[in-house]
Amino acid sequence: MAVLNLKQKLAILSDAAKYDASCASSGTTKRDSMGGKGVGSTEGMGICHAYAPDGRCISLLKILLTNFCVYDCAYCVNRVTSNTPRARFTVKEVVDLTLGFYKRNYIEGLFLSSGIIRTADYTMEEMVGVAKSLRLNHDFRGYIHLKLIPEASPDLVNQAGLYADRVSINIELPRDDSLADLAPEKDARGIRKAMGSVRLGIDETTDKASKAAPPRFAPAGQSTQMIVGADGASDGEILSRSAGLYGAYGMRRVYYSAYSPIPDTTSRLPPVRPPLMREHRLYQADWLMRFYGFEAGEIAGGEENLDLAIDPKLAWALKHRAQFPVDLNRADREPMLRVPGLGVKSVDRMIEIRRYKRLTLEDVRRLTRGVEKLKPFIIADDWRPGALTDEINLRDRVAPQQLSLF
């Protein structure tokens, strides 16, 4: 096999990392190298875009340690039976790349994943070696996200949490039986056990009742990713699984990645990818669960799929017209958050303003992107929708229209 230079390795292993979506970087501790100490920071502007704790956009070097893999997951382009070009970094090469790109102002951090080489422990030890070298040998203070291998030993998982800002373990597929069928080397119970171990590590370091402060452990928490459309799971099943992950393991984020067909794979997988709009709607529904107080079953239950034509909040409102219109001058925060077109910031601003004056339609117009979508669902000081809320063609009135290309 031809010997690859560093540039060729980077081309292969950065491209191989594009399938992992869980690389956001919010919620970590603030660090910098002011005073001439250390290298890097968790602040800044910027290859993979993510967001710092204060909301600013930063960039991460997003790569695999290697795309060699002893597993044969049917949906993965890096599976052992795939004929994809292979490459492998050494620990030193990843460290040097990270430091070199940072000093050129290309990146603010590192997102590192890997295929499984030799064993899970061997691979995890190499990945931890990268983070450990950056932190201890080079005093790197930038953001580090490590993708954990659930089969790795608890000691290695613990070390990863001590050196990384965020760790993640992919749940892979919404259904356990699909995982057993399409990724036989992976165990759903083992994945959940590893997630539980990470949560315990995080909880122990955030326990305010503890007198002695333990070393920080993954201060930006843990995240996971599900592949959408590789099996027959409905959106209702996917959202139910996500709700369980948030509740049981304290996930910061669940990411959704539309299945992408790969060459020479099994006929058990669909030949075409699902609509990208499905992935988008799942993210919108996930947002409703995390910030708007919706339960998964309210958005899509059982075998139900999300409506691809309209956003899930509007879809819910059209199905529950009896709960509208909402009086913006009298309603509590929770029902206001369920009004299509009203976001968290605009609702909080309205509640603040109405302490001093009654909200008019013009006030609503100033605080939102478009008042026409809201009018059937709200009451303001100078506005009542009347029969508009119950209008038969209300969906056509408030849903965005698809423009013709011809």
Image (cartoon, grey):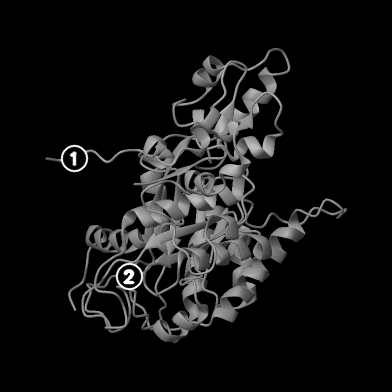
Q: Residue type at mark 2?
A: Arg
Numbered badge on residue 404: 1
Q: CA distance from mark 2 to mark 1?
A: 47 Å
- Compared to residue 349, the image places residue 163 above or below, namely below
Where residue 148 appears, as percent x and y from the top left, is: 52, 68
Q: Quadrant of residue 402?
A: top left
Marks 2 and 1, the one that precedes in the sequence: 2
Where residue 229 appears, as percent x and y from the top left, is: 37, 68
Q: Quadrant of residue 361?
A: top right
- For label 2, the residue is 88
Quarter in which the N terminus is drawn? bottom left
Q: Residue type at mark 1?
A: Ser
Q: Quadrant of residue 266?
A: bottom left
Where residue 186 appears, as percent x and y from the top left, is: 48, 82
| Secondary element at tag 1 | loop
* Residue at horizontal 63 percent and vertical 24 percent from the top: 349
- Compared to residue 55, the image places residue 299 above or below, namely below
Depth check: give the residue in front, 8 or 401.
Answer: 401
Depth check: give the residue in front, 6 or 147.
Answer: 147
- Compared to residue 303, the image places residue 359 above or below, namely above
* Residue at horizontal 63 percent and vertical 44 percent from the top: 29
Name the residue at the left extreme: 406
| Secondary element at tag 2 | loop
Q: In screen coordinates, is 268 left or right of 349?
A: left
Q: In screen coordinates, is 81 left or right of 389?
A: left
* Residue at horizontal 66 percent and vertical 70 percent from the top: 196
Depth check: give the residue in front, 328 or 153.
Answer: 328
Q: Is residue 233 visible?
A: yes
